Image (cartoon, coloured by chain):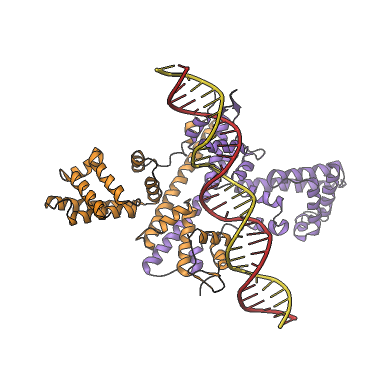
Chain colours: A orange, B purple, C red, D yellow
Amino acid sequence: MGYSVGQVAALAGVTVRTLHHYDEIGLLSPGERTRAGYRRYTEPDLDRLQRILFYRELGFSLEEIATILDEPGAGPMTHLRRQHELLRRRIGRLQEMVAAVEKAMEAQTMGISLTPQERFEVFGDFDPDEHAQEAEERWGGTDAFEQSRRRTAAYTKEDWLRIKEEAGEVVRDFAAAFEAGVPADDVQAMDVAERHREHLGRWFYDCSPEMHKGLGDMFVADPRFAANYEQVAEGLAVYVRDALRANAERRS
Amino acid sequence: MGYSVGQVAALAGVTVRTLHHYDEIGLLSPGERTRAGYRRYTEPDLDRLQRILFYRELGFSLEEIATILDEPGAGPMTHLRRQHELLRRRIGRLQEMVAAVEKAMEAQTMGISLTPQERFEVFGDFDPDEHAQEAEERWGGTDAFEQSRRRTAAYTKEDWLRIKEEAGEVVRDFAAAFEAGVPADDVQAMDVAERHREHLGRWFYDCSPEMHKGLGDMFVADPRFAANYEQVAEGLAVYVRDALRANAERRS
DNA sequence: GTGTGCCCTGACGTTACGAGAGGGTCAACT
DNA sequence: AGTTGACCCTCTCGTAACGTCAGGGCACAC
């Protein structure tokens, strides 16, 4: 019936203090306690611990790990796929470093000295990632942006595909309602708006109705976002904005 | 003439604060300062910083990095070779993790659940390393042992070969002196003893003359060490001990 | 001569634990 | 029944490697 802290610690190769810590911060609280207050870890707890250690070894902070693990709708397979992808990336990174070292060794034996830039090439280039940069300019350093950055850091290619698909669905539904002549403040349009808000919450950051409304305004004001909708149907950007506004009002 | 903190920070992809910190703890102090007190980093400083970042990314503590970098008689090539080896090891480790994830994925799709041991197999096995374990029993947790453990952690196979060769030379010289009938307290024997002490200091830990004397006593008292010398020549263990003693007295 | 940007030195905050202190719990041995 | 030893608990303090201001110089442009 469950494992004690000591047993789990030995099993997982961590200290008891670490488990206490994870309990303290709510990252991993044992499923049960004995009447004497002893921690009892269950099988699912071990599962979670294994994932924690995995992401930890890849350099994620405990806070990041918490958001990753508590991500809604992520089954075991999601994590395994993500882990696989992260490992592949990390290995790629190390192989770059190997190449850099080999280059340096050659330079050394040839008596050439590298320029400062060459020396640090292999560092610093932690993917500025188009998407992240765009976002930074836009919401620069806000709380939502921070949250988004942290969560998306762990997304794999497959995650992004799913996200794109989900987002595409929302746009299609907006377009369908728009072309069917459904008013933007109709419950049908507002429901799509709400789904959009949930989509953001699920994948990027918690989006309050007010924030969502502001986002809608930006969809119209910023040509880069507007184009996204306008290319589907002329006038769709304004329609979406109005739907988001109506939905925000409904939900407040 | 030199780089400012800001320039170096941008170049290496670290913050200014990090450079200040490295200066504070003496890990990387800029070669010069302007009359106004501004830090000026020279080319060798950049070199050192690059190495620091390298070992840091591989998970070494700054203290460990300091000892690695200030290791006597380690040229650029030594570091490059070491880095190459460390990277290869780390990649191997990650590949093990990939294999573990793939195994888990298979188990998942087959509906099998792994045992707790299986789940944590990939962790915990951070090489108990025969050598280190022996040492731990012997000097359990002493300062010297800690120092030794930290330094040897970064040694590559090639380092170990060099160490063995050096150690072998010392033993051969002891044996030669012993068989030539040179007294253990002769300056010739004491010089070999001193070389042995330096060898320890270079590769493992700072060994005071007193510690060295204690070590000599152990060479005789402990059959496992004694055998090391006795198999070369009968009576050599005692001879070595006496030489270490004589040398310790000479040097204090 | 007065911004504007970069630099300085403290000093305090944070994360992820390590290392005890002081004290219960529990199965075993006597 | 008592005691011993191996666990467990909570609480507090310490540490490493910085992040994050605060308060104040320096240097060059306009």
Q: To which quarter of the image does residue B191 belong?
A: top right
Residue B192 is situated, as x and y percent measured from the top left of the image, at 79, 43
Question: In the rendered image of this protein, does residue B209 appear above or below residue B108?
Answer: above
Q: Position of residue B251 (x, y in %)?
A: 83, 42
Q: Nearer the viewer, residue B250 or B77?
A: B250
Q: Is residue B2 above or below residue A187?
A: above
Dividing the image into 4 quarters, which one contains the C terminus of chain B? top right
Confirm whether residue B1 shows in the render. Answer: yes
Question: Is residue A164 or residue C21 the one in the foreground?
Answer: C21
Q: Is residue A227 left or right of residue A180?
A: right
Q: Residue at x 78, y 59 (%)?
A: B222
Asked if residue B29 shows in the view, the reply is: no
**Camera-side residue of B123 and D16:** D16
User: For the point 50% across and 54% down, which residue is it?
Assistant: B93
Q: Tag count in the figure? A: 0
Which quadrant does the N terminus of chain B fall into? top right
Relative placement, left or right, of B185 versus A212 is right
**Where is residue A201 drawn, in percent x and y?**
33, 53
Q: Is residue B38 left or right of residue A70?
A: right
Looking at the image, residue B156 sits to the left or right of residue A251; the answer is right
**Quarter of the image where one finds residue B126:** bottom right
Q: Position of residue A175 (x, y in %)?
A: 17, 50
